[in-house]
Image (cartoon, rainbow, N blue to C red):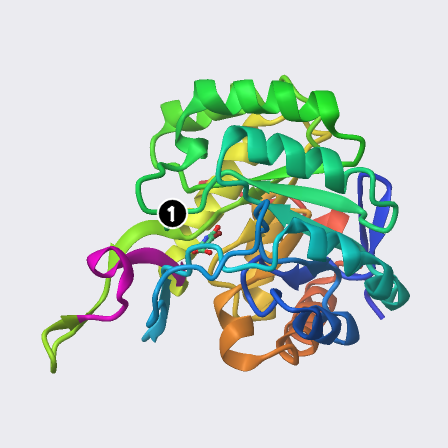
Amino acid sequence: MISLSITIANVTFPSCIYNASGALCTSLEELIAIGNSKSGAILSKSCTLEPREGNPSPRYHSLPYGSINSMGIPNLGYKKYAEFAKSLKRFGKPYIVSVSGMTFDDNVTIVRELSSVTEIDLLELNLSCPNLIGKPQVGYDFEQSKILFEKVFSVCKKPLGVKLPPYFDFIHFEQMANVLNQFPLEFVTCINSLGNGLAIDVETETVMIKPKGGFGGIGGKYAKPTALANVRKFYELLNRNISIIGVGGIETGSDVFEYLLCGASAVQIGTILVEEGVKCFERIEKELQELMEKKGYSSVDEVKGKLKTL
Ligand code: RRO
């Protein structure tokens, strides 16, 4: 059988396919369900210093080719995700906590505290939540990102990666890559949802979600070409010791294969996990294995980055 196992920061993932932060991963029950599934890791919902209710509902809607959300970081507060670590250890796969502090100082505090919890394997610093009212995404401010990394790496004792927003212009890829290459980052996750999209119900002539007048992050198939481009561009620009994790519109094993070709070491599943539940991991893994077998590949590393250009 083809192995989909990978290693990032000396941590072994039994499969390169796992959940995206935000998709069915807020409560302990949901995290246990991911543990019991074929997901290659357990990644938590982004956490803040204090618990949050999030934005008013409705705040998620599925769309013909994906989803729109403006959740507003509903989560149990970082201390709970630290507490959960012990009971998630038994699943024998990495436990990753996503961090999305409301302020610069909150991010530093949360990273410092979580980095001393033995059973947490990695941290994913989310610089790209598009749904906080009055708060721009840090990932679009290259100078501020650099200042934050300087501080975060001075307190972090765990392998740490960063989740980025989508970029659309080559100069912005270069500016961000230039910042990222200066730090001991273990991975970069591309991409967060396409920020501030708008979905409309023609029948009622109304927006689909309540917060921010209906504006929200777009996920699913709508995001895939942009996500592939971000993975590819960062694969070209980043130091080779920084792994790239792809996320956006993955529904099938063939979708995962495209991400691997672009240079991803692993991928995360968001919208389709919400729609299909944790059984999606087994299906997508099987599809990927069958495709790789048909093409004569036997490991993720053999496919990684092999995209051909014309
Ligand atoms: O909770 C959210 O509204 C949310 C977050 Br933190 C994020 O990073 N991306 C997203 O689409 N929604």
Residue drawn at (75%, 44%) of the image: 122
Any magenta on residue 103?
no
The percent coordinates of residue 267 (x first, y second) are 62, 55
Front residue of 64 and 146? 146
Residue 181 at least partly seen: no
Q: Can you say whether 34 is above or below 75 in the image? A: below
Residue drawn at (73%, 25%) of the image: 155
Q: What span is in magenta?
A: 207-219
Q: Quadrant of residue 224?
A: bottom left
Residue drawn at (68%, 47%) of the image: 265
Q: In which quarter of the image is the N terminus?
A: bottom right
The percent coordinates of residue 254 (x first, y second) are 57, 66
Front residue of 308 and 85? 85
Within 10 Å of the Cα at label 1, are there few (<14), some (14-19), or many (20+) other Cα atoms? many
Residue 23 at least partly seen: yes
Label 1 C-beta lies within 8 Å of the nearest ligand 1 atom: yes
**Of the residues shown, which amino acid type is indicated by label 1?**
Pro
Q: Can you say whether 105 is above or below 26 in the image? A: above
Q: What element carries label 1?
A: loop
Q: Name the residue under label 1.
A: 130
Q: In which quarter of the image is residue 60?
A: bottom left
Most extreme residue toward the front is 50
Q: In which quarter of the image is the C terminus?
A: top left
